[in-house]
Amino acid sequence: MVLTLKIYIEHLPIKKDGGVIKHVFGKCINIPTIQIQKISIIRNPFDLLCSYYHHSEKLDPNGKYCHSGWSSVNYTHQFKTFKEFITAYCNPNFEWHQPQFHNFLFSQLFDINHNCVADIIIKYEYLNEAKKMLNTKLKHPIDNNFVNKSHNKTKSYEEYYDKEMIELVNKKCYRELKYFNYDFNGSTKHEPLIINCNIKYDVYNNNIIN
């Protein structure tokens, strides 16, 4: 899922055009000088789907309600294996418990006008590096108090997939992988932070707008 939070930043040196220069990866980018920035975290769809399934409790074998998977996905659909989960998720005709997540894994990043609502997107794979970069500018630095809720995920996400599952996700999540620079092995581009993402997505019609 995508975690969104608001943070306050210190006053930074302002350029004539109203922006702030920040050097990242050997080039200059602008960080807006507004007092509140919206920050989201994304990660590799293959890893995200693995946590989607393994989140919280295991499925109760007696059919009793349990919080198994994000938003109780495993209880809702009675998925007993990760492969069942992936096969259903990648089936365009399957009636998924959260339709927007079925359409596009990062759909909650976008507003009614198709714009990305996050000013800054952190790539989870570079979380520590991104925190260090942001903490040089934040009035209230990001701390390290993170809690892992995927207790049943005991291996790296790669170990849960077979060839067929990889091919299914490559096809189903083609847009997430292409536009946010991921493949099965991780990020295909070194980018701890995505500033002012220019991708547009129509939530209602499930379309990337070029």
Image: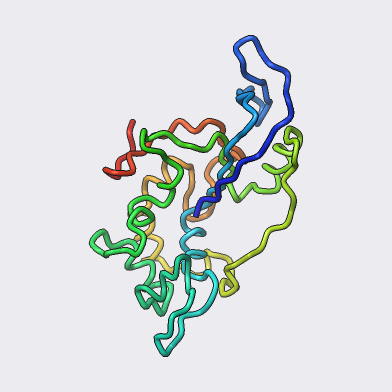
Using the rendered view, name the quadrant where residue 204 is placed. Answer: top left
The spot of residue 73 in percent (x, y) is: 41, 69
Using the rendered view, name the quadrant where residue 191 is placed. Answer: top right
**Residue in the image at 59% along x and 43% along y:** 122
**Residue in the image at 60% along x and 50% along y:** 124
Camera-nearest residue between 33 and 82: 33
Where is the C terminus found, in terms of image quarters? top left
Camera-nearest residue between 47 and 19: 19
**Residue in the image at 43% along x and 69% along y:** 162
Using the rendered view, name the quadrant where residue 28 is placed. Answer: top right
The spot of residue 134 in percent (x, y) is: 70, 37
Q: Is residue 79 above or below residue 183?
A: below
Residue extending farthest to the left is 93
- Colouring mode (rainbow / by chain / secondary structure / one colour): rainbow
Left or right: 188 as drawn, with respect to 90: right
Residue extending farthest to the top is 16
Count the marks: how many? 0
Residue extending farthest to the bottom is 62
